Image (cartoon, rainbow, N blue to C red):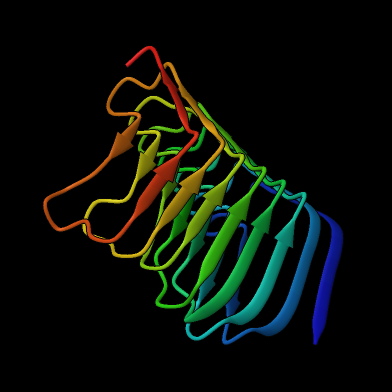
Amino acid sequence: MFSLSNVIVQNSFVNGLLLSDSESLLLDSLYVYNSGGDGIKIVSGGKNVEITECISNENNGSGIVSTATGNLLFQTCTTSDNGGSGILSLGTGYDSLASCISSGNTNSGYQLSDNSSLTSCISTEKGVGVDISGVTGCVITSGLCSTNTLAGILFAASTFDSIVSSYHIMDK
């Protein structure tokens, strides 16, 4: 088990924070901004990772990226004005995003992987609000997409067995 709390990372040349093969990890109250790549990046087999009250702004890449394999919780995180997306959940496990805010990111606010959930999250983007194209088993509930320049929620023909309920899409 490992915990990282109340840390500021600024002006790094590549990623602000890169975590590899992390298990039973808590990231709490991190502020990452102006990185040359992604703000926070979790790769290679991360399991049981909790990211709470983190802010990732103005990075050249995405705010938070996970390619981990299981059980990640993103709670009350804020991503804004990143050159990529807000939060990318690209792993193979079950990821849960709750009460997050994504604003002004170039690509999507949230991109979900199979069997992920998005609850009470807000997205106001330069691109897509929530991207679930090509995934299976996503659940999106009680949130808001507003003033996105592309789709509020992006589906594709290869999106299966997903549920969208009580989600408000405005201005697109």
Extreme residue toward the left, this view = 157
Is residue 56 visible to us here?
no
- Quadrant location, the C terminus: top left
The answer to whether 168 appears left or right of 96 in the picture is left
Q: Position of residue 75 (x, y in %)?
A: 70, 53
As rendered, which of 40 and 51 lies closer to the eye?
A: 51
Above or below — where is 39 with respect to 120?
below
* Rendering quarter of residue 84: top left
Q: Residue at x 14, y 58 (%)?
A: 158
Q: Residue at x 77, y 49 (%)?
A: 53
Q: Residue at x 38, y 51 (%)?
A: 163
The answer to whether 167 appears left or right of 55 in the picture is left
Extreme residue toward the top, this view = 171
Q: Position of residue 17 (x, y in %)?
A: 63, 63
Q: Position of residue 25 (x, y in %)?
A: 73, 78
Above or below — where is 17 with respect to 104?
below
Above or below — where is 2 with respect to 87?
below
As rendered, which of 33 and 13 lies closer to the eye?
A: 33
Q: Residue at x 35, y 29 (%)?
A: 152
Above or below — where is 110 with respect to 16?
above
Q: Position of residue 77 (x, y in %)?
A: 68, 46
